Image: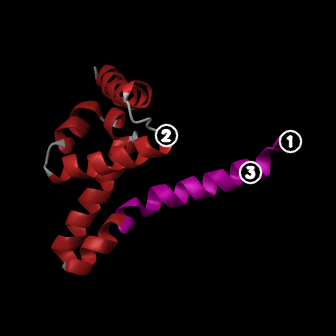
């Protein structure tokens, strides 16, 4: 069932993004969807509504961009509780640092391994 819920929730998040781009009178670009999803994930997380979705769907909720917003919000909340107002600014960056560093390292390795076609 874990894989089923990850597929359903992750797919639903992607469908929402696609519908935003296809059906709105204001043409959402992928960049608009990125900002909207990260912001929505942070707001929903701050309201305490995103963690139950993560508990249900696992990677289906944490891998999409809304999951990144959730990670930033939770890191900021934890940082604020531990270090005050400065922790609110540094906590999100600290929480996301491992994932961002992994993306940079693996992107660099892919760039070294493969040749671009021009």
Instruction: Say whether residue 11 is left or right of residue 112.
Output: left
Residue 30 marker: 2
Earlier-in-chain disc, 1 versus 2: 2
Write down the region rendered in magenta. Answer: 93-116
Instruction: Give the residue displayed 48% in from the left and 39% down from the top.
Output: 29
Instruction: Check disc 3 and report its element: helix, strand or loop.
Output: helix
Which residue position is annotated with label 1?
Answer: 118
Choose between 92 and 24: the one closer to the eye.
24
Residue 12 position, x and y percent, is 33, 25
Any mark on residue 111, and which? 3
Q: What element carries label 2?
A: helix
Vertically, is 18 above or below 90?
Answer: above
Q: In whole angstroms, how far apart are the C-alphas of marks 3 and 1?
A: 14 Å
In which quadrant of the rendered view does residue 19 lie? top left
Q: Earlier in the sequence, mark 3 or mark 2?
A: 2
Is residue 63 positioned above or below 91 on the image?
Answer: above
CB contact under 8 Å: marks 1 and 2:
no
């Amino acid at each position: 069932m874990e894989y089923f819920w990850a597929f359903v929730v992750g797919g639903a998040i992607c469908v929402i993004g696609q519908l935003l781009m296809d059906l709105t009178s204001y043409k959402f670009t992928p960049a608009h969807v990125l900002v909207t999803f990260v912001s929505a994930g942070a707001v929903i997380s701050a309201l305490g509504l995103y963690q139950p979705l993560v508990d249900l769907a696992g990677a289906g909720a944490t891998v999409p961009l809304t999951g990144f917003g959730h990670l930033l919000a939770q890191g900021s909340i934890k940082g604020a509780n531990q270090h005050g107002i400065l922790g609110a600014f540094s906590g999100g960056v600290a929480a996301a640092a491992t994932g961002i560093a992994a993306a940079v390292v693996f992107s660099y390795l892919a760039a070294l391994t493969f040749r671009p076609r021009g």
